[in-house]
């Protein structure tokens, strides 16, 4: 019996050693790739949670990496290759104009569509707006952001930028990412990162995964290889798009209790945006037109005197229906042509709504 136990113990030790060696080798490989490709120091503890254009943050959950730049080749949905030169400047802004400019200043807040990592700096929709309207643009967006994260960024930089106009980019995932219970049930809009949620009038940092907050947070901050593994597993699970809460929401609409709850939270948060903005005009649009999300955005915007344009995404979607190649390789985010079409639609609306006169000295 003692000999058998010793053999089992020895076998377990060997398996554990092999696992440790495998993880260690994976860690070395991933860190070497990050060093060569992204310039991230090899021994930096998961680069402070830095993964290319994203950096983990104790308040925001994650944020746009400051002073980041990269040149790469992207692919459109139809397979066309194109060169991309992307960068993020001070504070992680994708576009950061001159705060002392006499031109009309526009502050743009959004998520991955505003971060626009698959589009060159001068071809994002907000960069094109700067040219089309001759305005000074400040644009901050981060993939996976919910409304609370966007509000916290808005609150942090509003007084620095002092914009004349605020342009807010909605997306259907906002409702999922604004509610921890919904996000736990989502395979499509759940990146596994700890994020802040607005719950009962307070900000709470929570994990959207069943595994403990401490384990996921430790992996995110300390092991680039394990982070790579768990995120790939998340993507594999996300491939089953039928087993996700979004299917139920789109079938039930406001009858879905979780979605109704998320709408209330989102409404509260956009109320905080309006209060912080004061009398400044706020315009908003969504990255896609899908019910019941679109009607919820219309109602929330009307509740807080926010002008909502529901045709911006439709312009891009209509172009695809007519055979244009407007989406990136993932089939959901806009490529350079998609950004161009969105900018043209937005520019037309802004010209009609806002006097584009220079600021007084």
Image: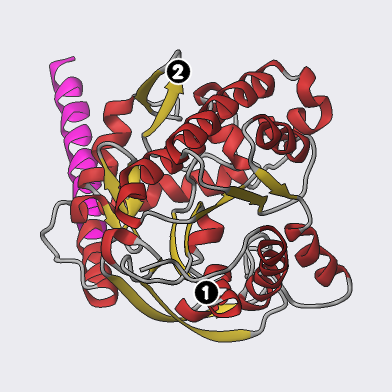
Say which of 201 and 209 sits in front. Answer: 201
What is the magenta range?
Answer: 1-26
Pointer 1 or 2: first along the chain: 1
Label 1 belongs to which residue?
A: 130
* Magenta stretch holds residue 346: no
Q: Residue furthest front?
A: 360
**Mostly what secondary structure, the magenta segment?**
helix
Q: Secondary structure at mark 1?
A: helix
Q: Which mark is residue 4?
A: none
Crowding at dot 1, Cα within 10 Å, few <14 / some 14-19 / many 20+, comes out as many
* Magenta stretch holds residue 6: yes
CA separation in Å, label 1 and label 2: 37 Å
Label 2 belongs to which residue?
A: 199
Q: Residue at x 43, y 27 (%)?
A: 197
Q: Is residue 321 left or right of residue 92?
A: right
Q: Residue at x 62, y 18 (%)?
A: 261
Q: Residue furthest left?
A: 43
Compared with residue 234, is residue 118 higher up or lower down, i.e. above or below? below
Compared with residue 43, is residue 151 higher up or lower down, i.e. above or below? above
Compared with residue 94, is residue 179 higher up or lower down, i.e. above or below? above
Q: Secondary structure at mark 2?
A: strand
The structure's colour scheme is secondary structure
Residue 165 in sight here = yes
Crowding at dot 2, Cα within 10 Å, few <14 / some 14-19 / many 20+, comes out as few
Q: Is residue 77 left or right of residue 107?
A: right
Say which of 360 and 185 sits in front. Answer: 360
Of labels 1 and 2, the one closer to you: 1
The percent coordinates of residue 336 (x first, y second) are 61, 77
The percent coordinates of residue 141 (x first, y second) are 46, 55
């Amino acid at each position: 019996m003692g000999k058998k136990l010793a053999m089992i113990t020895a076998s377990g030790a060997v398996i554990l050693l092999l696992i440790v060696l495998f993880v260690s080798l994976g860690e070395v490989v991933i860190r070497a790739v990050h060093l060569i490709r992204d310039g991230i120091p090899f021994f930096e503890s998961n680069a402070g949670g830095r993964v290319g254009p994203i950096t983990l943050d104790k308040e925001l959950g994650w944020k746009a990496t400051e002073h980041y730049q990269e040149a790469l080749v992207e692919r459109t949905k139809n397979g066309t290759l194109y060169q991309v030169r992307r960068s993020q400047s001070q504070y992680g802004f994708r576009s950061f104009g001159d705060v002392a400019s006499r031109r009309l200043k526009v502050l743009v807040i959004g998520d991955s569509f505003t971060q626009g990592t698959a589009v060159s700096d001068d071809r994002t929709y907000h960069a094109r707006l700067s040219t089309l309207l001759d305005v000074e643009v400040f644009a901050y967006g981060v993939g996976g952001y919910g409304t609370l994260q966007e509000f916290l960024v808005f609150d942090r930089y509003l007084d620095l930028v002092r914009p004349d106009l605020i342009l807010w980019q909605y997306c259907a995932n906002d409702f999922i990412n604004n509610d921890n219970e919904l996000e736990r049930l989502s395979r499509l809009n759940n990146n596994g990162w700890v994020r802040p949620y607005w719950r009962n009038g307070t900000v709470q940092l929570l994990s959207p995964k069943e595994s403990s907050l401490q384990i996921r947070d430790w992996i995110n901050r300390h092991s680039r290889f394990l982070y790579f593994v768990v995120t790939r597993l998340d993507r594999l699970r996300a491939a089953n798009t039928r087993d996700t809460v979004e299917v139920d929401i789109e079938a039930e609409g406001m009858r879905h209790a979780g979605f109704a709850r998320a709408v209330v939270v989102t409404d509260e948060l956009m109320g905080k945006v309006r209060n912080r903005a004061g009398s400044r005009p706020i315009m908003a649009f969504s990255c896609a037109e899908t019910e019941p999300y679109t009607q919820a955005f219309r109602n929330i915007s009307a509740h807080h005197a926010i002008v909502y344009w529901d045709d911006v995404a439709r312009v891009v979607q209509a172009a695809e229906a007519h055979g244009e190649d407007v989406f990136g390789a993932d089939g959901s985010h806009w490529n350079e042509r998609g950004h161009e079409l969105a900018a043209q639609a937005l520019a037309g609306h802004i010209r009609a709504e806002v006097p584009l006169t220079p600021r007084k000295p």
